[in-house]
Amino acid sequence: MKIGLDKGSLSGYYSNMTENRTLPTPYFHNDSITLYHGDCQVILPQLNFTGLLLTDPPYGINLSAKDASTRIRYKNVTSDTASFSKIQNDSGTLDLTFLFEYGYPQVIFGANNFPNIIPFDAKRDGWLVWDKRLTEKADKMIGSPFEMAVVRGKRMYKFVRLLHGGVVNADGWGIKRIHPTQKPIALMSRVMSYFPGLDVLDPFAGSGGTLLAAQADGRKAVGIELEEKYCEIIATRLQQ
Ligand SMILES: C[S@@+](CC[C@H](N)C(=O)[O-])C[C@H]1O[C@@H](n2cnc3c(N)ncnc32)[C@H](O)[C@@H]1O
């Protein structure tokens, strides 16, 4: 499904992005958000983006929401029965080094999974910890009770306390998740609030939480997502 492309309105804000003619046609765009369907390694070098890179890349943990033991553990806490295919590029073979070249400042979730490749300068950079604990019992059942994001370009050390069932019920109890590693929109809104006024780039857009948070905040944002089914979900969510 291709949604809402109006090439005429690509002038103005997006003109710097279209100077290079090899950029693909956006899958979706409106006044605030542009979404590309494709491989961010191919699209990023053509964007000339300036602003905040806020993203949640595949960490290489090879999570399978179909995995029986995982599902049973989640079920014990939440009665979650969702089943998803594996995220692409989550097998640990994707070298994320390229990410550090696009957008600045940067907030990159899951960075505790690849600390060895981060160009970290303690005088300039920091860490965010998303504390997502529900209960002591849930802590033991849902993998990690927290997630770390490296912050490049701002020396901040912060907890974002957002009580939450991990990957389950990403946007609140009773709201079905639509992506295996979906993050809450509220989390992305909170993180963005530490970087006022900046445009936002999410090259691993997933279900689009970053883009939805940007749109709600009246910011310009660019997203890239490899799987068309998630592009379709993002486009639909942005129009609701
Ligand atoms: C960890 S998930 C992001 C989940 C997102 N934070 C959310 O709330 O839904 C990573 C996403 O990156 C996508 N992806 C993997 N490799 C990619 C690539 N080379 N370019 C663009 N997207 C990619 C996957 O399809 C997946 O949706």
Image: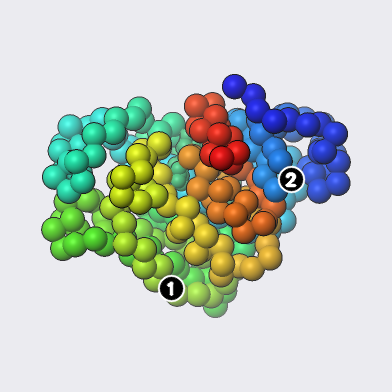
Question: Could you tell me which residue is drawn at 59 percent across and 22 percent down?
Answer: 1
Indicate the secondary structure of the residue bearing disc 1: strand
Within 10 angstroms of label 2, few (less than 14), some, or many (20 or more) residues?
some
Q: Nearer the viewer, residue 119 or 110?
A: 110
Circles 1, 2 touching at the beta carbon (< 8 Å): no
Q: Residue furthest top?
A: 1
In the rendered image, the quadrant that contains the C terminus is: top right
Image coordinates of residue 165 in percent, x first then y, are 28, 52
Question: Could you tell me which residue is drawn at 20 percent across and 37 percent down?
Answer: 71
Q: Is 139 on the left-hand or right-hand side of 209?
A: left
- Image height check: is 60 above or below 171? above
Which label number is shown at residue 31? 2
Image coordinates of residue 77 in percent, x first then y, are 17, 48
What colouring method underlies this structural image? rainbow
Residue at image mark 1: 158
Which label number is shown at residue 170? none
Q: Which amino acid does label 1 sit on?
A: Lys
* Front: mark 1 or 2: 2
- Image height check: is 213 above or below 156? above
Indicate the secondary structure of the residue bearing disc 2: loop
Residue 63 location, quadrant: top left
Identify the mark nearer the N-term, 1 or 2. Answer: 2
Question: Could you tell me which residue is drawn at 19 percent across and 41 percent down?
Answer: 79
Q: Nearer the viewer, residue 14 or 162?
A: 162
Q: Is 15 on the left-hand or right-hand side of 204?
A: right
